[in-house]
Image: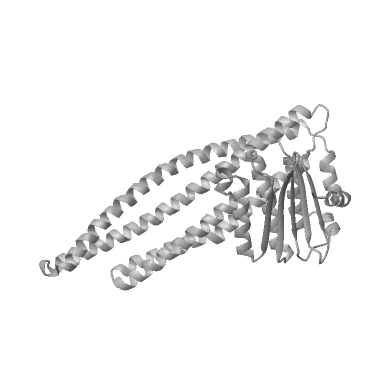
Amino acid sequence: MMTRRAFLFYNETRNPHLKRLETAVASDEIRQRLEAARDTYREELDRSRRELSEMDVLVRQSTVEVERLSQRELTVSNRVRDLEVNLERYSKEDIKNFFATAQEVQIRLQLMRGQLEQVQTRQGGLKARISQLSTIINLLDETVSALGGQSSNGSVDTSDDVLANIIQSQESERLRISLQMHDGPAQAMSNLVLRAEICQRLIDHDLDQARSELTGLKSAINTTLQDTRKFIFDLRPMTLDDLGLVPTLRRYTQQFSEKNSVEVNLMIQSLDTRLPNHYEVTIFRFVQEALNNVAKHANANQVRVLLDVAGNALQILIEDDGSGFHLTETLADDRSRKNMGIASMRQQIEVLLRGEFGIESALGRGTRVAATIPLP
């Protein structure tokens, strides 16, 4: 069982800005702005669903084309093998045509497979975005309902600052994603296009070199595909919807450990059933944010992640053996990136899930992040 020391410590040191978030009164203007934001997300959700429908059709068409080309490649390969066995039966012109046809079919098949993988990647990204938008809309629906039901007594823990922080967090996340897309998949795709053009030019001049380039291109496509899948997993793990929170956390902590060379000890106790979707999404993002902070700031060798159900509450603990930091100074600096990360985690727990959040840290003694969430 975790103690409440972390929560008390955080409550004693939180800055005036965060205190105002707890005492601010919800207004009709805030509710209207939230409703407008919800309507905007609904429009984006409709557009994404239409685009996904078109993408599904393109995937089916590309799949059929790949299967057709695969069958044709098999037929051509059989003819080439027959040619090699019975070489004396064919003229030089026939031999040249056979090999040219075989090479053309193989190139078209490779290009079509690459196109199919790109379309499937886009399809997966759209599915992730649709799931994310649905979660945001559900949360906004719940917030608007809460505001409508509690505005009369003024006991809602929200304000203009909360709305501004939500919008700022969304924009920061979009900026982060756009930068990662530019430096990762987008750059890799540009390189693939360039290498494909090189292969195209070599075909008419040096077939051996063209084959070598195609082999390298295939390897680069596979690498880009794996990197894109990892990017999609970080953005929105499909396993979160299909398998739930526990398998997703196990896979994520394993990948985090391998990527950052940090030993992660994940312990999950008494969490045997699925939670509502917005609970699982928020809890995953909370743990993800905490681990990202460890990777960016802690210089840690080990991290312990604990999820424990006690009674009707879920307790979460993330602690590392890193360098730590001055908590009071960080909380006092509203523009600090660490403070923004702490505020984001706090909003996830206290605003979205109505739980308790605490953090304690000291130089040379690591950092401990804790949360208690009432289960539905």
In x, y percent, where is residue 101? Answer: 23, 61
Instruction: In the displayed orientation, state which residue is furthest to the right.
Output: 12
In this rendered view, identify the residue nearer to me: 293 or 163.
293
Residue at screen point 52% across, 59% down: 227
What colour scheme has been applied to the protein in the rendered image?
Answer: one colour
Whether residue 347 is visible: yes
Quadrant position of residue 90:
bottom left
Q: For this view, does 373 lie left or right of residue 260?
A: right
In this rendered view, identify the residue nearer to me: 197 or 254.
254
Up/down of 371 relative to 302, above or below? above
In this rendered view, identify the residue nearer to me: 206 or 299.
299
Q: For this view, does 58 lie left or right of residue 301?
A: left
Q: How many numbered marks, from 0 up?
A: 0
In this rendered view, identify the residue nearer to me: 198 or 214.
214
Residue at screen point 69% across, 57% down: 291
In x, y percent, where is residue 177? Answer: 60, 54
Residue at screen point 83% across, 41% down: 22
Up/down of 160 relative to 264, above or below? above
Q: For this view, does 271 lie left or right of residue 50?
A: right
Q: Quadrant of the C terminus?
A: top right
